[in-house]
Amino acid sequence: MTHTVFIDGAAGTTGLEIVERLAPRSEFKLLVLDDEQRKSTEARREAYHAADFAVLCLPDEAAVEAVAMAEGSKARIIDASSAHRVAPGWIYGFPELIGREKIANASRVSNPGCYPTGFLALLAPLVRKGLLPSNWPYTCHAVSGYSGGGKALIGRFEQDCDIAFRDYALSMGHKHVPEMQEYAGLSHAPSFAPAVIAAYRGMVVEVPLHLGQMQRAAPVDGLRDCLVDFYGSSSVVKVHIETPEELLLRRSATPSDRLDLYIYGSRDGSQARLVARLDNLGKGASGAAVQSLNLMAGLDETAGLVL
């Protein structure tokens, strides 16, 4: 069976990578609009009503408008924006945490943010199992390649080669924080410190822990064992037993839809560092959308992924 897919925003960074993953596959037929049609509300509405699936690669406000445009159609929607990540009636598109069956049966799926993907993969299972407290004021440090900022930030980094590091969201209130708190089951919003580096793609997300100050916290080996067990059947998420002395992001990195997790602990066991490494355009965006699309279409969830 061939499924018709309309990618609204296919010319953007996320949309282009989704097209790259889907175009060679016979299970999907891409409904493509030319440059003029992309600007036409009527052409887009017709595309929604002709599609089995629609993937929104749009700014938040435009994504909300697109959902209204698709009202009454048969199209099942995956929204790659942050507009619906904690909205009622939407399923969060993180199958390893939310459940594959829920996503497979959903009509509305919201793609996780790239930073929250690393944060939640590390923390949510541990809080869920009671190995870390839900009421702790967690901190999240993260760096990402500049492609995560879309065309404007890509242009800025590529035109100004002197930029090495960009710290941002310094006034707090980053739009990813609500989903980080919601799906980790936390009482307090985490303190989130994101930054951008002079590499096109790649991301490291870290959660430092003061285990010795927590009333209820498992030892480092217990945290690692929990994640190994939790992701044991996953072909996408790998929990590493080894703890290399350094973790690198390379400017030459090629697309990947994997998510690698590492657990580091101090010798006395009083501190730990939970670290996730991923491609912000892979499992952090396009790869996650394709994974959800596969499940919704009744296919192998890893089909077309770069693993």
Image (cartoon, rainbow, N blue to C red):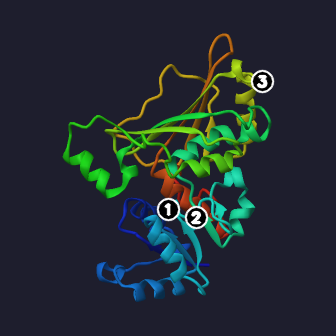
Q: Residue furthest front?
A: 171
Regarding mark 2 in the picture, which secondary structure is present there? Answer: loop
Tell me where residue 11 appears, x and y as whole percent: 35, 68
At 51% from the left and 49% from the top, the residue drawn is 114
Residue 27: quarter of image: bottom right
87 vs 125: above or below: below
| Image side of residue 11 versus residue 175, left or right | left
Asked if one can make out residue 127 in the rendered structure from this viewpoint, the answer is yes
Residue 58: quarter of image: bottom left
| Residue type marked 1 | Ser
At 53% from the left and 22% from the top, the residue drawn is 244
Disc on res. 81: 1
Q: Residues within 10 Å of mark 1 (few under 14, many from 20)?
A: many
Asked if one can make out residue 299 in the rendered structure from this viewpoint, the answer is no
Are the residues flagged by discs 2 and 1 in contact, CB closer than 8 Å? yes
Tell me where residue 152 appears, x and y as whole percent: 29, 56
Badge nearest the viewer, 3 or 1: 3
Residue at numbered disc 3: 215
Q: What's the CA distance linking mark 2 and mark 1? A: 7 Å
Regarding mark 3 in the picture, which secondary structure is present there? Answer: loop
Q: Earlier in the sequence, mark 2 or mark 3?
A: 2
Q: Residues within 10 Å of mark 3 (few under 14, many from 20)?
A: few
| Image side of residue 29 versus residue 150, left or right | right
At 62% from the left and 31% from the top, the residue drawn is 240
Tell me where residue 116 appears, x and y as whole percent: 56, 46
| Residue type marked 2 | His
270 vs 208: above or below: above
Residue at numbered disc 2: 84
At 53% from the left and 87% from the top, the residue drawn is 49
| Residue type marked 3 | Gln
